[in-house]
Amino acid sequence: MTVILGAGITGLSVAYHLKEKNRDFIIVEKEKTPGGLCRNLDINCYTFNYTGHFLHCKTPYVRNLARKLIGDIKTIKRNSYVYLNKRIIPYPIQSNRRYLSYGSRIKTFLSYLLRNKEKPENLEEWFVHNFGREMHNIFFLPYNEKLWKYTLKEISPDFLKSYIPKDSYVYSEKTGEYNAEFLYPEKGIGTLVSSIAKDIEISHGEVDRVEKDFIYFDGEKIEYENLISTIPLPELLKMLYINGEKFGSEKVNLIWNSVLCINMGIKGKLSFGNSIKVFKKNNLDPSEFHWIYFPEKKFPFYRIGSLSNISHSLAPENRSSIWVEVSYRENKPDKSIVDDVIKNLEQIGLLKREAIEHISQVDIPYAYPIYYKDCENIVQEIRNFLKKYNITLAGRFGDWKYSYMEESILEGKKVALELCR
């Protein structure tokens, strides 16, 4: 029997593809609803998420699967920006220097020509190597320090190579980045994971203990031949027992950041008004943004987005929604963070406080695994060790890596097919 821990998108993909092969399995999930961070949150006629999750597709397989599951799923061209020095600059900023001030254009161009071309050893050197010191200083350094809450000199650059366009002057949306467009269901990304989960029997409850050949789930002892873990790796290690002794997860140095997502329902439409300089590209309206990056330290958030701008059905008529992402490590922001966020959104002209009719928060304890220099070696040792006990790690949090939805679906398929050999 195969046991799958976690009914997020990776675990559901494993189950979906095993079901296609008529293989038996048990999938367990501690939450009341499946989908993990991709599930919908329906509150007061608004649909929110755990920040923004979008199906960026490179492969025909995932594209066709999504259309099979949701016939009217839409292909949407990304409309995202960087907010910098009271300017809205189309993303990616390294390909839109013409929207910077004249002085910044000259400095970023010269520093790009004079950039260090030696092989980068850490994330800071990688940004400088690919974009020049000036672009690093005005965007990549402040934004990534705000996101990761960790010094960039101690982070390995390898995990980001396929996510950020390298060549900032010879750029094509078709070849330069992975997320120029995405598939999105009209009723929110949660309908995609719900469609994958359809007809899959899920056992809801807590796993208390994992041993060789057995898990203890809600007081029951369940035997497994293969165990697929998609739950956060630190959580698996906490419940792992080898030969009757606790594994000792505190000895494994895994680090991560967490994200507080603040969801807001707003009366009326979002608009930057006349308080800032607005730059348009290809007739795209910045007030119809999908998401915006905020590198400057004065803003407590690193990114905001609007699901209602992506699909109008995710907010009531004449209403809008936004989500706000605040990163943290050890200490979760206190209650004052909401007021701080609102003040900043008012200052940039996006909304007025009196227009807010709903505020709720969701905490994401494991948001981004941090790839410090020895992380990959440590995780590989854990993978090899667990393989001896027929335990396979999978997914962004289970296998402790940076990935997006399509990769999770494909990994789930790959794991399922390997189990069927």
Image (cartoon, rainbow, N blue to C red):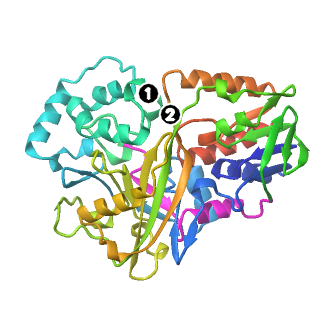
The reply to whether residue 186 is visible in this rendering is no
Picture layout, residue 189 above or below residue 390: below
Q: Please give the name of the residue rendered at 62% of the width and 48% of the height, measured from the top-left corner.
A: 409
138 or 115: nearer the viewer: 138
Q: Is residue 341 magenta?
A: no
Residue linked to disc 1: 155
Q: Secondary structure beneath disc 2?
A: loop
The quarter of the displayed image where residue 106 is located: top left
Mark drawn on residue 370: 2
Q: Please give the name of the residue rendered at 34% of the width and 48% of the height, measured from the top-left corner.
A: 173
Quadrant where the N terminus sits is top right
Q: Amino acid at mark 2?
A: Ile
Q: Position of residue 33 (x, y in %)?
A: 69, 62
Q: Which residues are magenta?
A: 177-201
Do labels 1 and 2 touch, CB within 8 Å? yes
User: Would you call the spot at circle 1 few (<14 residues within 10 Å), some (14-19), or many (20 or more)?
Assistant: many
Mark drawn on residue 46: none
290 or 319: nearer the viewer: 319
Q: Is residue 262 left or right of residue 235?
A: left
What's the CA distance linking mark 1 and mark 2? 7 Å
Q: Earlier in the sequence, mark 1 or mark 2?
A: 1
Q: How many marks?
A: 2
Q: Secondary structure beneath disc 1?
A: loop
User: Would you call the spot at circle 2 few (<14 residues within 10 Å), some (14-19), or many (20 or more)?
Assistant: many
Q: Please give the name of the residue rendered at 73% of the width and 64% of the height, measured from the top-left corner.
A: 198
The reply to whether residue 413 is visible in this rendering is yes
158 or 219: nearer the viewer: 219
**Residue furthest out toward the top:** 118
